[in-house]
Image (cartoon, helix red, strand yellow):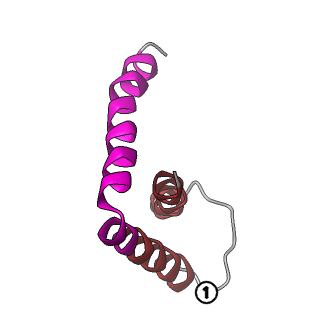
């Protein structure tokens, strides 16, 4: 469960870069862009180490997330 919960904060911080590129972010961050890059790097390294230590559990978490993607796009297109 921790593996899948570690993915979403990384995606959230990546979204910050998208918002900044589109000039939609009013959030001021100290150390931008180095602070988010450091967070993303640390998060990805922890996920990678988790994948190496417990590949079965990490694979189940990835499969669960991937199984939910079609549902997300199915309901997202109706709006």
**Side of 14 relative to 57 (left or right):** right
Q: Residue at x 44, y 74 (%)?
A: 46
Question: Principal SS element in the magenta part?
Answer: helix
Q: Position of residue 57 (x, y in %)?
A: 38, 53
Q: Which residue is mark 1?
A: 31
Please state which of residues 10 and 14 is positioned toward the viewer in this rendering: 10
For the point 47% across and 79% down, the residue is 42
Q: Quadrant of residue 44?
A: bottom left
Say above or below: 66 vs 8.
Answer: above
The residue lying at 39 percent from left, 77 percent from top is: 45
Magenta run includes residue 74: yes
Viewer-side residue, 64 vs 31? 64
Task: Please determine whether, in this image, residue 11 is positioned above or below residue 43.
Answer: above
User: Does 61 sit above or below residue 50?
Assistant: above
Residue at 49% of width from left, 83% of height from top? 38
Q: Which residues are magenta?
A: 48-77
| Image coords of residue 37 (percent x, y) | 46, 79
Residue 31 can be seen in this image: yes
Q: Position of residue 63 (x, y in %)?
A: 32, 41
Q: In the figure, residue 76 lies in which quadrant?
A: top left
Q: Is residue 69 magenta?
A: yes
């Amino acid at each position: 469960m921790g593996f899948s919960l570690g993915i979403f904060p990384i995606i959230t911080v990546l979204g910050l870069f998208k918002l900044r590129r589109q000039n939609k972010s009013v959030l001021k961050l100290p150390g931008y862009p180095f602070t988010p890059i450091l967070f993303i790097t640390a998060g990805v390294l922890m996920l990678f180490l988790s994948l190496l230590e417990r590949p079965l559990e990490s694979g189940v978490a990835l499969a669960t997330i991937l199984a939910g993607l079609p549902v997300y796009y199915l309901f997202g297109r109706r709006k």
